[in-house]
């Protein structure tokens, strides 16, 4: 009889750490007081299987670890996932949420967590405070169940955390972030925190200048309110002979945080070379924020002016040199009249005869 074919090998079992068994109370042991809800949510980190098939990266290898808000958590949950954390609360409140750290690879991953404040870059983009600097607002108000989490292969770790809003926190938006680092990678998740109270949307446009040499208009935008703004900008310019530029309002690639200033530029490649220009910038944002500022410039082609001036100076110098040359020529003496000696004697006798007679000599 033919031999039986060998049985196919069994797939490797997914390793998921088991939860510790429950401890029963011993008789006669004194009862421990209950912990607060904010402290209970930080007591453990739950590990959940991420799936039997590991995710693949673009290069064909296992995808790196990822962090994201847990679905269904926070004050604004979403079933299909959340791109960031959204939290709202009054001063003195404690807000709870959960961060998911997923390791799809075949090896354990250790990830460190920290809170950070949001900041604006020079171009208006949003950045976070570095690990060396200490956060002062939202980043300092974040407390994690564990700041260092080791995630087994093909496993997801659920990390609870709280946001403790100080009693003296100002109303409005307080943007921050959760920064995870490990294995040479650093990933951030935005935290949109709004503290209850009156809100104000206000911004100003300042230091408007026309840089004709660089074909651009420079200006500053300042968020004077307590909400995050996405400004829109309209540009208008007038010259000696009418309108030179009229651009309708458009949304800028800027997320202006409360109390922050950014320096921006507006390109103008076809700016006139010789004109008197008045530039007007109008910035608007949601919530009724609006401001207008202007700047003036007298555009002169200094290269051409310098060339004409050099020619004029050269011509003037030639004229002056010619006049001076003519003045320096010595005047020739007039030739004396030559008279005969006999005629001179006759004239002298006549003058002596007329002398004393009262006649004109």
Image (tube, grey):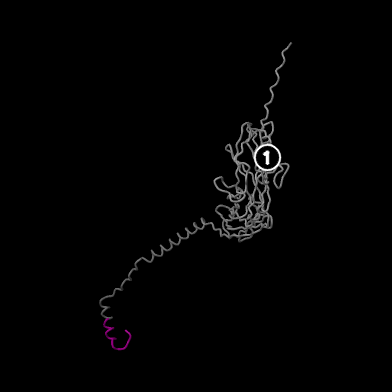
On screen, 83 above or below 313?
above
Q: Quadrant of residue 21?
A: top right
On screen, 78 above or below 234?
above
Q: Secondary structure at mark 1?
A: loop
Q: Pick whichever, 235 or 153, lies toward us.
A: 153
- The residue shown at (52%, 57%) is 302
How crowded pointer 1 is (Cα within 10 Å; few <14, some 14-19, many 20+) is rated as few
Residue labelled with disc 1: 28
- Identity of the residue furthest to the bottom in this view: 357
- Give the residues in magenta: 348-361
- The residue shown at (59%, 38%) is 182
- x, y percent for residue 259: 61, 55
Q: Quadrant of residue 145?
A: top right
Q: Quadrant of residue 321?
A: bottom left
Q: How many marks?
A: 1
Task: Give the quadrant of the C terminus.
Answer: bottom left
């Amino acid at each position: 009889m033919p031999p039986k074919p060998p049985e196919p090998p069994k797939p490797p079992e997914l390793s998921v750490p088991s939860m510790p068994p429950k401890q029963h109370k011993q008789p006669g042991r004194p009862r421990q007081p209950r912990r607060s809800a904010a402290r209970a949510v930080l007591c453990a980190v739950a590990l959940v299987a991420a799936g039997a098939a590991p995710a693949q990266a673009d290069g064909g290898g296992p995808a790196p670890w990822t962090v994201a808000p847990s679905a269904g958590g926070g004050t604004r949950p979403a079933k299909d996932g959340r791109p960031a954390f959204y939290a709202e609360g009054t001063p003195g409140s404690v807000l709870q949420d959960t961060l998911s750290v997923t390791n799809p690879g075949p090896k354990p991953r250790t990830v460190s967590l920290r809170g950070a404040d949001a900041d604006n870059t020079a171009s208006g983009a949003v950045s976070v405070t570095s690990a060396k600097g200490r956060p002062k607002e939202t980043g300092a108000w974040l407390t994690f169940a564990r700041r260092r989490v080791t995630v087994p292969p093909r496993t997801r770790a659920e990390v609870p955390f709280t946001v403790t809003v100080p009693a003296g926190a100002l109303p409005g938006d307080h943007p921050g972030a959760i920064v995870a680092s490990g294995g040479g990678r650093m990933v951030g998740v935005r935290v949109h925190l709004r503290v209850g109270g009156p809100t104000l949307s206000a911004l100003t446009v300042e230091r408007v200048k026309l840089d004709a040499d660089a074909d651009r208009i420079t200006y500053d935008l300042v968020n004077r309110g307590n909400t995050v703004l996405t400004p829109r900008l309209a540009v208008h310019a007038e010259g000696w002979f009418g309108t030179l530029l009229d651009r309708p309002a458009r949304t800028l690639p800027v997320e202006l945080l409360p109390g922050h200033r950014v320096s921006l530029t507006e390109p103008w490649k076809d700016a006139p070379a010789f004109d008197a220009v008045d530039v007007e910038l109008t910035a608007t944002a949601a919530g009724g924020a609006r401001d207008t500022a202007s700047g003036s410039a007298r555009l002169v082609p200094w290269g051409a002016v310098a060339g004409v001036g050099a020619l004029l100076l050269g011509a003037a110098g030639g004229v002056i040199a010619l006049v001076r040359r003519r003045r320096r020529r010595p005047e020739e003496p007039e030739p004396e009249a030559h008279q005969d000696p006999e005629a001179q004697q006759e004239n002298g006798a006549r003058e002596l005869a007329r002398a004393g007679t009262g006649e004109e000599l």
